[in-house]
Amino acid sequence: MSVDLHSHTTSSDGGHSPSELVRFAAEAGVDTLAITDHDTFAGLPEAIAAGEEHGLRILVGVEISVRHRPGTFHLLAYFPQLGAEPLSERLVEMRTRREERGRAIVARLESLGAPVEWSDVVGRAQGAIGRPHIADALVAAGYVKDRQAAFDRFLANGGPAFEPSRGLEPDEAIALVRESGGAPVLAHPFSLRLRRKDLGSTIHRLTQRGLAGIEVHRGDHTPDQFRTLSKLARKLGLIPCGGSDFHRQSDERRLGNTGVPPLPSETPELLLEYCDSDHPVRT
Ligand code: AMP
Ligand code: ZN
Ligand code: FE
Ligand code: FE
């Protein structure tokens, strides 16, 4: 059995409904699954019900967009139960910002000679709108052969149609998660695109602000990346976390694949203990 603390549903840019995702996870031998959609908790009630049906524990999670350049900063957050306020309320505004950013990307595409209808993009999303929905619209319009080509040619960070995320400031995001009773965890730390030394000092600073953990166990980490992050987590007293970051069956990522070595089974308890504690800001 395995534990997977990072997954997406159709409530953001995943390809499967929450109940379908939970069924796939049960079939893949996952016994604890966190749903971590981008900027929304919308998939969780359905996932929790499906978890009861399949005998699988569902953890309440979310992947929050944070402002950062030149890479991507995603803050995962885990909660003992639904109803994370004030965070939930702020996410409403974040989803509006996602929409505004999506429209700005579509405007750029038009000036690049690859117009797509905004209504077509919206029609592909059932929840939080993201670049993958725009990528699918570009594929459907025949500009590119697949989603990856849409990212490579237009949408990737720094690409011609890219617009930076209009998320929360890092300290604000961490504080909001903590105030809402959750455990903040830095997702895929290498996507920050910092040099090793800067990565260490940045994560150190975030730890002082109250970061609880970082993703260490991921199927897409090289052995060298695993070692670097594992050491850093130990040095800073952070909980080594991880997951598959599964979006859809057709992708390479597999539910429950958290790399080698896999995510330890006690990690959910460490996160929930963190949520329960007073976790004072370290200075
Ligand atoms: P967004 O939330 O709109 O910034 O979109 C982020 C999502 O786009 C990620 O979760 C990935 O699923 C996907 N993505 C980001 N960068 C790339 C890339 N270079 N190639 C393929 N997919 C990507
Ligand atoms: Zn995603
Ligand atoms: Fe992410
Ligand atoms: Fe993700």
Image (spheres, rainbow, N blue to C red):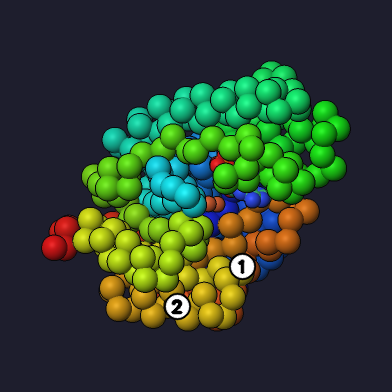
- Secondary structure beneath dot 1 equals loop
> Looking at the image, is 178 positioned above or below residue 273?
above
Decide which of tag 2 and tag 1 comes sooner along the chain: 1
Q: Nearer the viewer, residue 248 or 132?
A: 132
Task: Find the distance from the CA under tag 2 to the CA under tag 1.
Answer: 14 Å
Q: Please give the residue where the numbered disc 2 appears in the rendered image.
A: 228
Q: Is residue 4 left or right of residue 15?
A: left
At label 1, the amino acid type is Asp
Q: Residues within 10 Å of mark 1 (few under 14, many from 20)?
A: some
Residue 188 % position (x, y): 50, 61
Is the residue under label 1 in contact with that under label 2 (CB below 8 Å)?
no
Residue at x-position 47% and y-position 81%: 227
The local crowd at label 2, few if under 14, some if 14 to 19, many if 20 or more residues have their Cα within 10 Å, is: some
Q: Amino acid at mark 2?
A: Thr
The answer to whether residue 239 is visible is no
Relative vertical location of residue 68 with respect to residue 251 in this rendering, above or below: above
Q: Which mark is residue 220?
A: 1
Which corner quadrant of the image does residue 9 belong to?
A: top right
* Mark in front: 2 vs 1: 2
Element at label 2: helix
